[in-house]
Image (cartoon, rainbow, N blue to C red):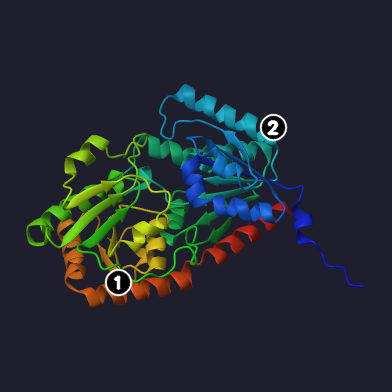
Amino acid sequence: MKVEKNHNFLFKNNKILFVANVDWFFISHRLILAKAAIKKGYKVTVICADTGRRKEIESVGATFVNFQFERSGTNIFKELYTLLRFYKLYKKIAPNIVHHITLKPVIYGSIVARCLKLPVLNAVSGLGFNFTEGQSGFSTKLMIFLMRIGFKNKNLTCIFQNNDDLNVIKSRGILSESNRIVKIKGVGVDLNKFSYQIPLQNEKISIVLPARLLWDKGVKEFYEASQLLKKKYASKVIFKLVGMADIDNNAGVSPETLKGWIDDNYFIWVDYQKNMVPVYNNSDIIVLPSYREGMPKTLLEACAVGRPIVTTNAIGCKECVDEGINGFKIPVKSIKKLAKAIEVLILDKELRLCMGEASRNKAVDEFNQVNVISKHLEIYNSLCK
């Protein structure tokens, strides 16, 4: 009699520790991986700040630990205390794998994991403001120094979402020869949840920027481009910012500034939406004039729903658009070129539909979340051996 092997049994005593900055970011970008790991038999613990959504993480079977820390702290004594708290938690939980998400956990967590000789998976999902062009101040240099220390771990794997971030990390001498490098295009997208939808026949063409409202997401450029087009198209289009004002981020746009931009008939701000599907379905053009990304989740979702995209030729963004096929790429901070690209799409409905279909095809070929989950599970398996 042939006995079927229960592969979940292989992992039932293995513990994965996910570490991120805040609960909402983990839910948006990595909860699907925690669910898949639990289904395979791993015991999962998630460490991050609780902003009121811990129950969503616990509902999938994960243990949640509320861990508050400043995402951009500068007080050396507070930062050393934060590092000590990381150490105590890691030692207490004693995981088989630590999966770091977002830059501060990657930096501090890698140092602690090296001290405790723990296998590490670092998700380098965009290097953030300190690695944008021209940034070479003390904080950037300190980050690089600490990353060099933490990455000297023979059992450390790094996931990069694009070649540019990988090349930056290499050029700064952060990677060690023993590190394993894996390239995965973002967190992928659920092609069933974000299914192809023909744009609704609204009275006005809806032009949407869906993102956290940070200056380096190109929010200012989006607003100023809208003003360049206002005289010609105020009766035909509506510009929408959709996202939360991240006031704890140094690059956050203040709610007061956002409210000052609002023109209910032409430019509006819609706060954070838990379910983004209706937002995309109710859009005609998706815009993200970001300065730098890892692999922007919003653009992957926009591709899946089938929308034309206007973005920049910045790191991370450019991988989501094939120029002239499913959208346009413009130089970072180029307001006039941003306005022109949007105008081309405003004036050509057939082009919008053709580019939207091309976006969906790109999502199916390159961004399927099923493949992303499978690759992560393979990495977890290899780190447990």
Q: Is residue 79 above or below residue 221?
A: above
**Relative to residue 283, is residue 193 drawn left or right?**
right
Give residue 249's position: percent from left, percent from top.
Answer: 36, 37
**Relative to residue 280, is residue 114 drawn left or right?**
right
Residue identifier under label 2? 92
Find the residue positioned furthest to the top: 77
* Quadrant where the image shows the N terminus: bottom right
| Residue 44: quarter of image | top right
Q: Nearer the viewer, residue 359 or 251?
A: 359
Q: CA distance from mark 1 to mark 2?
A: 50 Å
Q: Amino acid at mark 1?
A: Glu
Badge 2 element: helix
Give residue 215's position: percent from left, percent from top.
Answer: 27, 44
| Residue 7: quarter of image | bottom right
Local packing at callout 1 (Cα closer than 10 Å; few below 14, some 14-19, many 20+) is some
Give residue 311's position: percent from left, percent from top.
Answer: 29, 61
Camera sees residue 123: yes
User: Which numbered marker is on residue 363?
Assistant: none
Find the residue positioned furthest to the right: 1
Residue identifier under label 1? 323
* Quadrant where the image shows the C terminus: bottom right
